[in-house]
Amino acid sequence: MNIEKINLEEAARIALAECIELKKQENVLIIANPDTEQAEIAQAFFEQAEEMGASPRLLFQPVKTQADYAEDEVIEAIEAAPPVILSISTEKLGKDRKRLSSPLKAPDGRSFDHIFHYLLHGISAIRAIWTPGITKDMFIRTVPVDYLKMRAAADRLSALLTQASVVMVKSPGGTDISFSIQGRKAMRDDGDFRSAGKGGNLPAGEVFISPAIKSAEGTIVFDGSISDIEGDIVIQKPIACTVCGGYVMGIEGGEEADRLEKALMRGLNMASRLLHQQGMAPETALSYGTNARHIGEFGIGLNPAARIGGNMLEDEKVLGTIHFAIGSNYDEDAPALIHLDGLVKSPTVVLLMPTGEEITIMEHGALSMVAALTE
């Protein structure tokens, strides 16, 4: 594949064919924001889906942040459960007002506060892609990658993480933290969204897991980039977070550290507003508020075409980095109203297995156990 000759339309076709495996006559819901780069990408998806014989529908809504609700028309369109949903958003899809007050229960007992997550993860009714903040350059550059190699690397890493008991991470920047993943199952965003119940980002390229609740202890020093409710930023002065009992208890650094502290406080305040304005049960609001400081994700980047540029959608996929998220997790047992990812560069990651064996999966940013699969 000659990447230099790939254009927007060809990248969209690659995504629909290799990632979604779109079928003729399938209904496709595409959600975007008008007059944006993302709208152009959404239009390319629409046109390519039509050419492939599917039945796409393109729906626009104003730009949404982590603090905003999706438009009612968008929620209603998702409720129809088309087999393929593409959220090509400038920032976020938007929260589900109805389910925040009355979460949906999946057959396995898990609770979901958004219809999109319920359809995808709760009852496996849809295939999905979401691309918050994607640009045309990023789309063309990072989507046409070797998905076979990426998925092989993801296979090995996810298997090791699922088997492991504890993760230990250190970095030259000062990160020194450990946390349990006992009983957790690793998830993957490797571009394989070809069956119902699967979905993820484009660009793809990460394996991630939810740390066990209240298990993380140590220090995380974010030194790549980090998410803020108002947008992503490249870190100029590293942010040192002290983590105790799974929660961020202290934040030190410069201007970026102040922004992170304000974002976490806003996550707490958002839960308080739901209590007073939406009638959320007090115990639920308390859980959402406190979990705004909980370590919700540990992830490993796998996309060789990705690079750090202050856009977390791409940054967290950069090969040679890991990331942590503060806020909601992916096991749906520590809900929060925010999910803020931050990068750690050149990490060393060691897994403690139930047998007592220690396995180094990354050393100074280089994958060890799966290096041959990512060359």
Image (spheres, rainbow, N blue to C red):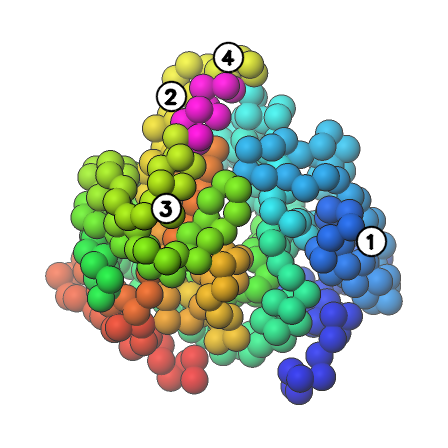
Estimate the x, y position of residue 171 in percent, counting from the top left.
23, 64
Q: Secondary structure at mark 2?
A: helix
Estimate the x, y position of residue 99 in percent, counting from the top left.
59, 26
- The vertical placement of 177 against 293, above or below, is below
Q: What amino acid type is highlighted by mark number 1?
A: Pro
User: Spatial distance from mark 2 to mark 4, Cα to Cα?
Assistant: 12 Å
Q: What amino acid type is highlighted by mark number 3?
A: Glu
- Quadrant where the N terminus is found in the figure: bottom right
Q: Main secondary structure of the magenta part?
A: helix
Q: Which residue is mark 4?
A: 276
Q: Which residue is mark 2?
A: 286
Of the numbered discs in the image, which one, if any, rests on residue 56?
1
Stretch in magenta? 266-274
Using the image as rendered, state which of residue 280 and residue 254 is in the foreground. 254
Estimate the x, y position of residue 93 in percent, counting from the top left.
63, 42
Q: Assess whether residue 40 is covered by the magenta stretch.
A: no
Q: What amino acid type is highlighted by mark number 4?
A: His
- Dot 4: few (<14), some (14–19), or many (≥20) neighbours within 10 Å? few
Q: Nearer the viewer, mark 1 or mark 2?
A: 2
Q: Is residue 227 left or right of residue 96?
A: left
Of the numbered discs in the image, which one, if any, rests on residue 255?
3
| Dot 4 and dot 1 residues touching (CB under 8 Å) | no
Q: Earlier in the sequence, mark 1 or mark 2?
A: 1
- Dot 2: few (<14), some (14–19), or many (≥20) neighbours within 10 Å? some
Q: Earlier in the sequence, mark 4 or mark 1?
A: 1
Q: Nearer the viewer, mark 2 or mark 3?
A: 3
Using the image as rendered, state which of residue 217 and residue 134 is in the foreground. 134
Q: Earlier in the sequence, mark 2 or mark 4?
A: 4
